[in-house]
Every structure is written in structure tokens, then in C-alpha cells.
């Protein structure tokens, strides 16, 4: 087993340790650990009492030799609470410096509760520390060993300074109270162990740095970037703003996810990580999930709405040709008339002059060329649908394989994608049945005794290609 595979197995064990004793926190545990591995920060959004602080404390246990810092902020908080007290000796020497030992500038994992209640002075100082891993202490700037910060809040900020700080958290993770199904399990949990130690499989700094180096070499293939380009345009159309800086960080997170699973290429399925990166709140994240559910693994050409229009166009054309009437002519090319018309017995209602009514019709007949052209179009459509069915089967097999080996996949989103792919497969079967029925219907149209050799106009529908 190579080092990458060994790391993956250890991460799987760490995730089990992080999740142990927690109810319905599978997604949250995975996202905060992945963010930390990528050197990014996470924001937990939810009401009090939903294990937000517990998640941060456990994350600290996943990293060996990591120092932990935790603080609850209020609107009365002062910088000393986060960055350390001023040095009296330094002040006596006309220097403005802080004692940072034990405070945020020297922490590896930090938890800041009610983070947006801090004043602008604290938030501005935090911006540099979180983004650059540096802290201005007096006349100098010191490097900070920060791996990841977990912020917590009940709501998304709306003022300008807090919004800029909000953007520093790559993952925004809504946290809800446990469901009715999980409540009984919650009540049965034993008390938390206050004397917990670092997890046995905790990562050392050298291992995390090696993962970061491997992630840099992970490829981002065109099929992934194409989806991201498509999603970026879709988000802009729905007034969901995502900065260029955030997109760059998202690409880094995807590479880290792939590297942690011993892969050298980002998979399109890794895009399931995007809702928490792109949506500001649960509502926006659900919009992204819905888009991913509909688009991942699906080429537009075989999306059911598009094929529905194509098949429906053939059905409408068949109905029109079945119901089409022609005037009836005899063998000499003269209009065939009824016996009453030939006897001159048709009068208008006022007893005026006799008038011939050319109303004798028959069902339209079609030549072999016409019918052959229609069935040829349907043969092409059936071949294309069959190709889509084969392609979709390969996509579904790939998703099953990815799902079995993924550490980070969101289970509800995976279930939604699987259900969508299953529904598309069923729709392709239905389109095949309907297209074959159209084929048989055109074959059964009344035929001319001789083929005039004129091909019909094509059925008006969308082209098959993307």
C-alpha cells in the first residue's frame, strides 16, 4: 500500500473518531476536516446547542502537536481576548507589542463563537490572520501556525466589514437540531468525556504538508472545468455572487479531496462539495444542490425534457399524417363526385342554382420514399437513445464506484443524484417504446400504388447533438 492509500485509510479512521458519539453530524464532520486539510476555514451556521463547539474541539484532536484556541465574542470583546495582552515591558521601551503565547496568533486550530459580534477592529485584524497566516505585533509581522479556524454564528452578516470577513470562510455549513428520528439516539448518548486526548491516527504536520504538495499536482480535467464554467454562469443569472478568489480556493479544495483519496485527477463527482462553498445560506446551497443533481452525469443532449420534445414532435407528425385527407380523383385525373352531385340534385337552401360540392375525400396515401424517410429519422433517434442508454449505464457504474470510495460525499446529495440518474434511465426506456411505436405507425400509413420518389420535409424538432 502506497503512502497515499495509507493516508486515505487513516483519514477514514479519523472521520469515524470525529463522528463517534455525535448524532446526524456526518456531513459537518467531513467538511470541517477537509477544509482543515486544504488549509481553509469553516463557518458553522445554526442555533445554540447544536454541537458547533464540540465539532471544533474534536477537529483539534485530529492533528498531532496542534495547539487549540477557543473564544466566545460579544459586542464588548476587546482585541486582548483574541491576540493577547499588551506587554508592559515593551511599552516601557516605547514598543506596542502583545504577549501572544496561548492566544490565537499561536494556535493551530481555533474556534471563534459568535464571530460576527466582534467590532470592526477585531474583524479587520482577523482578516489578515486568517488569510495570510500573519499577525502584526508591534513593528513586526509574525507568522502564525494556524491550520484552520472554525467560526460559529446564528446568522449571515449583512454589514460591509462582516461580509468581507464572512468571505474568508470557504465552507459555510448550516447546522440544524437533530431530526425526530435521531432524537431518541441523542437522549441515549453517554456524557462527553472531558479528558479526551489526541486521536491515535492524528496527522502530523509533515503528513499534512505532504498532502498539500500532492494536491498541487492533481489535475483539473476539462469535463470538470466545463461544469464549473456552466455553474458560474448559472449562479450569475440567479444573482448569487461568487468572487474569483473563492473559485480559486474551491479548485484547491477539490484537488485536496482527490489527493486525500489517492487520486491524481479531480472527478466530476467531487463537485458535490460545491454547495457549502458557493451558497451563503441554506436556501442558496439548496439551489446549488438542485443544479448539481440535474446536471452531474447528464449530457444535455439526453436530458429528458429535450428528448421529450423530440419524441413528441414525431408523435404529433404521425397523428397529423394519419388524419390527413385528400380529395378523391378517378383514374383519368378527374375529381370523383357522389351520385347525387352527378344527378344534379344538390341545391342551395334557397332553391337557387345547382352547385357541385367537392366534398368527397379519402385518407391520404404515402409513397415508400416518404415513409422510408420518416422511419429513417426514427432509426437514427433510436440509435442515439440506445447510445445514451449505454453511456448512462457507464456513468451510473462510475458513480457507484466513486461513492464506495469517497470520504467526503454528502449522502443526501448522493441519493438525489442516484435517483435522478435512475429516473433518466427509466425515461430513456419510455422514449424508446414511444419512438418504436412511431416507427410502426409510419410503417402502417396508407400507401400509394407507386412511389412518386419525393421525400417529406423533416420533422421539426431540436437537433440530437448538444
Image (tube, helix red, strand yellow):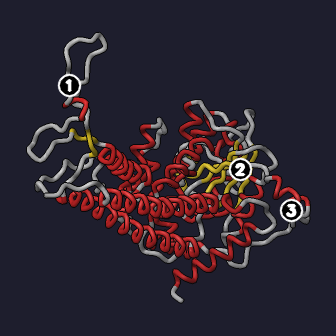
Q: Is residue 296 left or right of residue 83?
A: left
Image position, residue 81 (x, y; %): 73, 44
Closest to the camera, between mark 2 and mark 3, is: 3
| Farthest-out residue, front | 343
Q: Residue at x 28, y 56 (%)?
A: 465
Residue annotated with mark 3: 185
Which residue bears the numbered disc 1? 344
Q: CA distance from mark 3 to mark 1?
A: 93 Å
Compared to residue 344, the image places residue 136 above or below, namely below
Q: Which residue is mark 2?
A: 175
Marks 1 and 2: CB-CB under 8 Å? no
Would residue 67 appear left or right of 320 to someone viewing this image?
right
Residues 178 and 130: in front is 178
Q: Classify the position of the C terminus by image quarter.
A: bottom left
> In the image, is residue 113 above or below residue 425?
above
Residue 335's image quarter? Answer: top left
Alpha carbon distance from label 2 to label 3:
18 Å
Few, some or many C-alpha atoms within 10 Å of disc 3 (few <14, some 14-19, many ≥20)?
some
Mark 2 or mark 3, earlier in chain: 2
Q: Is residue 193 left or right of residue 309?
A: right
Query: If you read the primary sequence from the N terminus, does the residue marked by circle 3 or circle 1 appear first?
Result: 3
Q: Sequence-wise, which precedes: disc 1 or disc 2?
A: 2
Name the residue nearer the viewer: 196 or 285: 285
Q: Quadrant of the N terminus?
A: bottom right
Please provide percent x and percent y for residue 238.
Answer: 47, 37
Q: Is residue 320 visible?
A: yes
- Labels 3 and 1 touching (C-beta < 8 A): no
Q: Residue at coordinates 68% horizontally, 45% vertically from top-left? A: 45
Amino acid at each position: 500500500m502506497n503512502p497515499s492509500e495509507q493516508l486515505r485509510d487513516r483519514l477514514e479512521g479519523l472521520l469515524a473518531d470525529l463522528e463517534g458519539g455525535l448524532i446526524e453530524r456526518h456531513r459537518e464532520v467531513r467538511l470541517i476536516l477537509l477544509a482543515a486539510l486544504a488549509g481553509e476555514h469553516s463557518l458553522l451556521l445554526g442555533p445554540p446547542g447544536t454541537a458547533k463547539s464540540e465539532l471544533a474541539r474534536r477537529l483539534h484532536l485530529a492533528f498531532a502537536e496542534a495547539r487549540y484556541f477557543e473564544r466566545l465574542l460579544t459586542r464588548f470583546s476587546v482585541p486582548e481576548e483574541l491576540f493577547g495582552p499588551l506587554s508592559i515591558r515593551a511599552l516601557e521601551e516605547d514598543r506596542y507589542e502583545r504577549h501572544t503565547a496561548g492566544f490565537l496568533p499561536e494556535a493551530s486550530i481555533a474556534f471563534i463563537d459568535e464571530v460576527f459580534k466582534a467590532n470592526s477592529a477585531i474583524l479587520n485584524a482577523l482578516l489578515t490572520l486568517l488569510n495570510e497566516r500573519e499577525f502584526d505585533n508591534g513593528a513586526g509581522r509574525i507568522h502564525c501556525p494556524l491550520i484552520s479556524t472554525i467560526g460559529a454564528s446564528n446568522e449571515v452578516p449583512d454589514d460591509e466589514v462582516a461580509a468581507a470577513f464572512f468571505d474568508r470562510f470557504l465552507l459555510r455549513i448550516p447546522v440544524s437540531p437533530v431530526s425526530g428520528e435521531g432524537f431518541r439516539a441523542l437522549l441515549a448518548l453517554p456524557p462527553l468525556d472531558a479528558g479526551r486526548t489526541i486521536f491515535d491516527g492524528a496527522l502530523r504536520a509533515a503528513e499534512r504538508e505532504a498532502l498539500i504538495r500532492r494536491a498541487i499536482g492533481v489535475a483539473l480535467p476539462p469535463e470538470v472545468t466545463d461544469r464549473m464554467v456552466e455553474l458560474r454562469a448559472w449562479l450569475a443569472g440567479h444573482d448569487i455572487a461568487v468572487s474569483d478568489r473563492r473559485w480559486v480556493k474551491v479548485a484547491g479544495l477539490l484537488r485536496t479531496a482527490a489527493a486525500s483519496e489517492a487520486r491524481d485527477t479531480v472527478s466530476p463527482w467531487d463537485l458535490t462539495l460545491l454547495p457549502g462553498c458557493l451558497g451563503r445560506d441554506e436556501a442558496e446551497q439548496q439551489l446549488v444542490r438542485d443544479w448539481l443533481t440535474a446536471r452531474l452525469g447528464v449530457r444535455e443532449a439526453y436530458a429528458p425534457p429535450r428528448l421529450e420534445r423530440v419524441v413528441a414532435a414525431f408523435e404529433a407528425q404521425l397523428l397529423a399524417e394519419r388524419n390527413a385527407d385528400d380529395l378523391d380523383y378517378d383514374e383519368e385525373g378527374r375529381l370523383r363526385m357522389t351520385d347525387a352531385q352527378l344527378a344534379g340534385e344538390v341545391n342551395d337552401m334557397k332553391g337557387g342554382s345547382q352547385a357541385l360540392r367537392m366534398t368527397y375525400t379519402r385518407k391520404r396515401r404515402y409513397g415508400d420514399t416518404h415513409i422510408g424517410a420518416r422511419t429513417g429519422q426514427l432509426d437514427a433517434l433510436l440509435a442515439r437513445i440506445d447510445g445514451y442508454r449505454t453511456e448512462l449505464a457507464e456513468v451510473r457504474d462510475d458513480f457507484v464506484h466513486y461513492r464506495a470510495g469517497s470520504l467526503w460525499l454528502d449522502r443526501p446529495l448522493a441519493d438525489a443524484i442516484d435517483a435522478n440518474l435512475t429516473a433518466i434511465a427509466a425515461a430513456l426506456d419510455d422514449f424508446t417504446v414511444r419512438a418504436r411505436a412511431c416507427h410502426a405507425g409510419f410503417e402502417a400509413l396508407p400507401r400509394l400504388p407507386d412511389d412518386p420518389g419525393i421525400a417529406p420535409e423533416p420533422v421539426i424538432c431540436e437537433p440530437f447533438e448538444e
